[in-house]
Structures are given as C-alpha cells and as structure tokens.
Image: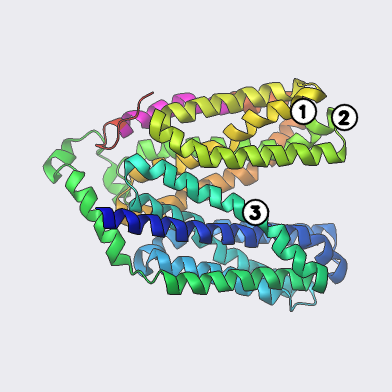
Amino acid sequence: MRGFRSRAGWHLASVASMHAVSDALFAGVYPLLPLIASDLKLSYGQVGAVKAILGGASALLQVPAGMLAETVGEHLLLAVGTGAVSVGLIAMATTATFVPLLIWTALAGIGGNTQHPVANALVSRLFGDGRRHQAIGTLNFAGDIGKIAAPFIGGLGAYYYGWRGGVTALGITGLVFAIGYALAVPVTRGSVAQAMRDQVAASTPDAGTRRNHSIWHRDSWRFRAWGIRNPGAYGALTATGMLDAAARGAALALLPFVFDRASLSSAEISVAFAVLFGAGAAGKFLCGPLATRAGPTLTIMVTEVVTAVGLILIPFAPKGAILWAILPFGFSLNGTSSVLYGLVAPFVDPDQRGRAYGLFYTCTLLATASAPIMYGAIADMVGLTGSFAVLGAITLMIVPLAHRWRQSFDGAGHQPVTP
C-alpha cells in the first residue's frame, strides 16, 4: 500500500503540473488579444470570435475526450491534448489573416478538452474517499497557479517579439511540458487503474447485494454504458454543479458594474478582482481538506450559503467594506468546485469516470457560458441589485439538491457524509 500511495502522490504532482501548464496556455492568450487585434486589424466582433472559439472548442468535446481516455489511457491523452494546444498556439504566430487565426485557435481549443475530465477522473481513481477531495482540491489549485504565471510567460515573449513571440513562448512551454510528461510518466492504463479497480472490487458489495442496493434503480440499465450507478443522484449532483457554475459565471460578469456603482477607481477594481481570485484560489486548495474533515455535504452547504448571502448583500456594501466582503465570498464562490468534482467519482464505475466527468464538465461549462447572458437580461429588467438577489436565491436551491444526492452517497458503501 505504501508503494501505491507514493505512486499516487507522484501522479498527482505530475497531473497537477500539467493542469497548471494547460490553464496557463489558455489564460496567457487573453492579455495578448489587443496586440493581435492591432496587428491583424481585427474588429471587436472578430476578437470576440477568437475568444469564443478558444473557449467554446475547449468545452464541446469533453465527453468524447473522457471516453477516448478509457481506450488510449489518461496519461497519453493528457500529453497529446496539451501538445495540441501548444501546436495550435505556435501556429497562431504564423498567421497574417483572420480565418487562419480562427482555424489554429480552434485546434488549440480542441486540445484543451482533455485536461479537466481526464485529469479529474485519473486523480479520483488514484485516491480513495478519505483523500479524494484534498487531492482534487490540489489539482484545481494548480490550475490557478498556472493562470497567475501565464501573463509573465506570454508577456515576456511579447515584450521582445510582439504578440507572435508571446504565443510562441506559451506554445513552446506547453510543448516542453507535454513531451516531458509523456517521457517521465510512461504509465499505461493497466497499472495504476488496475490497482484502483482491485481496491474498489474489494470494497464493493457482490452482485446479488448490489442488485438490491438502493443505489441501483430499475431504470439504471440505460446508464450503465456510461458507468453511472445512480442516474437520479448523478443528475442532482450535476444540477448542483450547474447552479454553482452559473453563480460564478454571472457574478464575475456583473461584479465590475457593482464596483463601478460603488465608485471604485480602475485601480481599486483591479485590487478587488485580485482579492477575489486570490481568495478563490485559497478556497480551491482548502475546501478539499475541509470536506475530508467535516464531510462534503456540510462543506458544500456552508460555502453555497456564504456565496448566496454574498450575492445578495455585496451590491449594498459601502465602498470601504467591499474588499472585506469579497474575501469570504471569493473563497466560497470558487472553493465549492473542488468538493463537487470529488463527489462525481462515487456515483460512477472507476473504469468509466472519464466520460462521466466529461458530461459533468460540459454541463457546468454551458451553465458558466449562459449565466452572464441570462442574468444580464434579468438585470436589464429588474436592475443590478435585483439580478444579484435572484442569483442568490437560486444559488440557495443547492441546499435541498444536496440532500438528494447525499442520501445515495451515504448508502453507496463509501465514506459516510456527516451533515
């Protein structure tokens, strides 16, 4: 067991490093967009198209990426995906017109589909119930570290060689890490995965008991090809993730207007967002250990209530109190995701978690993308404060949803959840 744990720790470190690099590749492009627009004479609409394709292409193929990982192996797919992002970025540096730029941007985005569902599925199988939330929290925290480092990598290249140098520097960095990962972690699917399957088999009721277990519904045969043991609980958990992602997406889009209405200067708004993202990174890192100690259900309920209260009260906060309100709000707004990602695993067979994570991520990404549009329309109708009140009230719906999947989680033969 000690050897397996040390191997699991090595894989977590390597996958977390890849996550940091992957997020850095995407985050590093956005500060370069004004330089790209100026050089290629792009309109705002065309710049928006570049951003939409980069983000959209990285969200549309998450399910196929998770399914492909079951065949070719997670490690190979993580390396190939990051390599594809890197090649797309390097190719972007060679373009002189808009259409080729979009094509190579799409390639970079497609490579990004592999990171989140594949990495989370791999880590969820490497670590048992007692350590899963902390491990996935570490994985997600690494992504934020990459986002912080990205402007330095791309900015340094852009300082000397323009935007082409910036995206090339990002691409070369990603390519080096992808090749290094493929060489340093030459693990086929069978070794670590089989160890986890053996552990799961040892702790899972036999077939006769499992048929009578509450986690198996009469209609679950329709979902067995996806490895989903309890469709109702998995659906409730996915709905929880979508509401959480919607709160995050809408809040980040509308908070600048709240800050502006509170008469914050441009510098103060930048500080407020720095505090928000810093608190969010801390939340991603610390909510995993909190879930391990206090239970994931209690952790999610508390963080979502804090998020909802923050959404309702921050629009009324005076200028001097906003930064203090942003600290707990940012912690809970981003921290819940680490716990939710860890909860997907108990409802899915270990061999098929890639596709289930892909479906979960696709749904949450769609919620993130659509929430600013929906709540922006609500703000047009009832005002900014009203839209935040509606968002906070809907976010509170996560509490009863949590009871739906908590009962199945408690009865699934996994670590009990203490509310």
Nearer-N-terminus badge (2/3): 3
* Separation of marks 2 and 3 at Cα, in angstroms: 28 Å
**Residues drawn in magenta:** 395-409
Nearer-N-terminus badge (1/3): 3
Nearer-N-terminus badge (1/2): 2
Residue 236: percent from the left, percent from the top? 43, 35
Nearer to me, 300 or 221? 300
Which numbered disc covers residue 147?
3
Callout 1, which amino acid? Leu
Is 402 magenta? The answer is yes
Q: Nearer the viewer, mark 2 or mark 3?
A: 3
Nearer to me, 190 or 144? 144
Q: How many residues crowd around disc 3 within 10 Å: few (fewer than 14), some, or many (20 or more)? A: some
In the image, residue 390 sits, relative to residue 173, either above or below, namely above
Callout 3, which amino acid? Lys
Is 201 magenta? The answer is no
In percent of the image, x 57 and y 73: which residue is there? 176
* Separation of marks 1 and 2 at Cα, in angstroms: 15 Å
For label 2, the SS is: loop
Nearer to me, 219 or 402? 402
In percent of the image, x 80 and y 21: which residue is there? 318
Magenta stretch: dominant SS? helix
In the image, residue 377 sits, relative to residue 145, either above or below, namely above
Q: Which residue is mark 1?
A: 384
Q: Is residue 204 left or right of residue 126?
A: left
Q: Which residue is mark 2?
A: 263
Nearer to me, 219 or 75? 75
In percent of the image, x 36 and y 36: which residue is there? 232
In percent of the image, x 43 and y 71: which residue is there? 184
For label 3, the SS is: helix
- Residue 103 visible within the image: no
